[in-house]
Amino acid sequence: MKVKEYPLSLYSSWRLLRLSCCSLHEETADDLPVVVSLTSIPSRLKTLHLTIRSLLAQECKPEKIVLWLNDDLKNSLPETLVQLEGRRFEIRYSPLTCSHRKLIHSLEAFPDDVIVTCDDDSMYDAGWLGRLWVDHRKFPDSIITHRCRKITYGDNDTLLPYAMWPIEREGGATYPELMPVGYGGVLYPPRSLMGDVCKSELFLKLTPKADDLWFKAMSFLQGTQVRKSLDPGMKPIPIIRTQGKALKNTNIKLDQNKMQWEALCRHYAIRFKGSA
């Protein structure tokens, strides 16, 4: 987390903490038929309530927010998180410990619903969900993402390191190599991912530390377009003291994303036009 991000993070935390639990669960005329789904790890439980508060405080609220945690955490939840449970927010449990929990269990539990994923180490501005929904209405069969990169090959069709996959900045961009980056928020229409998506024996073997890559492969194999939102808005606001164990930092530093994408390509014979 950068020093310049601290003031906004502190202010956003203060603003969210002023909101009462009752007000966060109030039904509004703008409720969206969407399930927001996420997961978390033990080291972030103490600050996770800030992420949940930011989701509950959306201008266009989701019908449901589901947090998927490992079974071992059932008796370890802080009161700041438990007190937020209500008609709109619930906590469910999983035997898995991987980040893929953020989506796969909700795909099984809500197969006919639009599902939006996000991360547990950020706060989301009040218009975040509404902007995804606007684009979903325009492109109902596409996966909509606020943040994304282009999977890129170099000379001799060799996959470049993840750090060299350029960030896509053009709103509305869509092409086969476009990969959603989960921290920004990703909207999945029903049945937009290949049936293998929930097969844990496969994703734990091929992409044990890269849920973004797994979900990208599943959308590509299903023939679903990925589209960058027309108005991504401001970046999610990082929560202080949550970035140290970020999976994305480990993957980029060790180039594990590259290795895991290559494993996917070998297993599923994934080929983009122009790649070997």
Image (cartoon, helix red, strand yellow):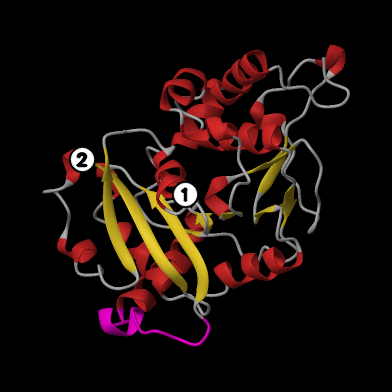
Q: Is residue 107 magenta?
A: no
Which quarter of the figure has residue 14?
Answer: bottom left
Q: Main secondary structure of the magenta part?
A: loop
Q: Residue at x 39, y 63 (%)?
A: 65
Horizontal placement of 215 versus 134: left or right?
left
* Up/down of 231 relative to 47, above or below: below
Horizontal placement of 158 versus 76: left or right?
right
In the image, which is nearer the foreground, mark 2 or mark 1?
2
Q: Is residue 22 magenta?
A: yes
Whether pointer 2 and pointer 1 mark residues with C-beta atoms closer than 8 Å, the reply is no
Tell me the distance, in whole angstroms, between the alpha carbons under discs 2 and 1. Answer: 30 Å
Give whichever of 265, 10 is nearer the camera. Answer: 265
Where residue 71 is drawn, which disc sits there? 2
**The magenta stretch spans which residues?**
18-30
Give whichever of 207, 103 is nearer the camera. Answer: 103
Where residue 267 is drawn, which disc sits there? none
Q: x and y percent of residue 186 in the render? A: 58, 53
Indicate which disc, 2 or 1, sits on the residue closer to the N terminus: 1
Which element type, helix, strand or loop, lies under badge 2? Answer: helix
Which residue does the numbered mark 1 point to in the structure image? 1
Q: Residue at x 39, y 68 (%)?
A: 10
Which element type, helix, strand or loop, lies under badge 1? Answer: loop
Any part of residue 121 in sight? no
Answer few, some or many: residues within 10 Å of disc 1's Cα (few below 14, many 20 plus, some between 14 and 19): few
